[in-house]
Image (cartoon, helix red, strand yellow):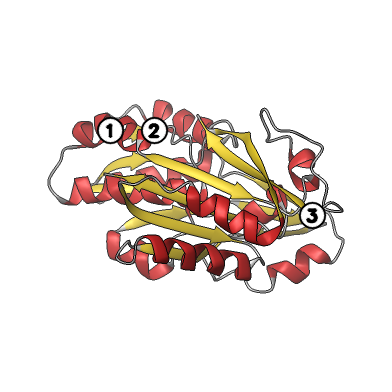
Amino acid sequence: MIKIITDSTSYFKQSEAEEYGIKVLPITYKSGNYIYLESYSGTDKDIENLLKSGYGYSTSHPDEAVFSKAFQKELMQGNQILCIPISSRLSLAYKAAMDAAIKLDNSNIAVFDSLQTAGGLNLLVKYAKILANNGSSLSEVYMALPKINNKISTFFSVNDMLSLRKSGRIGIVRMNVSTIMNLRPILALKDGTIVSEEIARGTMDVIRKLSDKMPLNTKEAVINYIENSDTAIGVYNALKTKAPYLPIHLRKAGPVLAIHVGLGFVSVSYITE
């Protein structure tokens, strides 16, 4: 069996991960002397109030030892492993997974740089697992991943740029977005990094612009949000109006993403036919 391993920024619900047989490794976040483990979508309670408390937070990817332990456990159970972590341009998780795979030197381990996070990572992992469950070999699934990735697009908006500026995880992004002027950035994840798309004026324009990004041949979508549930529901309803039978998953993102992009985040990821 091919076991797919990803990290918690894929924001699977626990029931969904169990249904597909996907192993999710937690990314840690730290405040003062306390270390927490990010878990499945919707299980990190009261994270909004924690982030509003004013304490400084930082995050840390699963290190080489964590990946190595997870890989060895699956190998002992007779499984092949396909590891698909968060984009290497956003985290060192991919490097840690590669280092673990190289040291174990086992042809039954493959590591793929997703160039994704959140809904995009969720869709990539899900469709990789569908291929594996349908009988594709490890090499066949791995070779199919770039093609699947090319069908995925992710767009998002934030209330302000402060957290993104602090995180350093931004590419070509205009910095003069003003919440005073009720302007909101529309950003995209392109080739694994964050780039600027356009500017929206207010919540309704954010909803319209994010839903207008949906390609005509979309077959599934994932909406992620942090605190900003009203906007997320607005995007959901706008997409359902355009495509009533489209599978759309509304998922609350977790503390790791919240720390780097801030509260008020909403994103939508699409995968096309």
Q: Secondary structure at mark 3?
A: loop
Q: Name the residue rendered at 39%, 41% in the picture.
A: 152
Q: Nearer the viewer, mark 2 or mark 3?
A: 3
Judging by the rendered image, the residue that carries numbered circle 2 is: 112
Q: Name the residue rendered at 62%, 41% in the picture.
A: 187
**Mark 2 vs 1: CB contact within 8 A:** yes
User: Label 3 is placed on what type of residue?
Assistant: Asn
Position of residue 170 in the picture relative to residue 110 (left or right) = right
Judging by the rendered image, the residue that carries numbered circle 1 is: 142
Q: Nearer the viewer, mark 1 or mark 3?
A: 3
Rounded to the nearest angstrom, the CA distance separating label 2 from label 3 is 39 Å
Q: Residues within 10 Å of mark 2 (few under 14, many from 20)?
A: some
Q: Position of residue 270 (x, y in %)?
A: 41, 48
Sequence-first disc among 2 and 1: 2
Rounded to the nearest angstrom, the CA distance separating label 2 from label 1 is 7 Å
Q: Secondary structure at mark 2?
A: loop
Q: Secondary structure at mark 1?
A: helix
Sequence-first disc among 2 and 3: 2
Sequence-first disc among 1 and 3: 1
Q: Name the residue rendered at 77%, 71% in the picture.
A: 49
User: Label 1 is placed on what type of residue?
Assistant: Tyr
Q: Nearer the viewer, residue 255 or 229?
A: 229
Q: Is residue 76 above or below residue 105?
A: below
Q: Residues within 10 Å of mark 3 (few under 14, many from 20)?
A: few
* Mark carried by residue 182: 3
Q: Nearer the viewer, residue 207 or 169?
A: 207
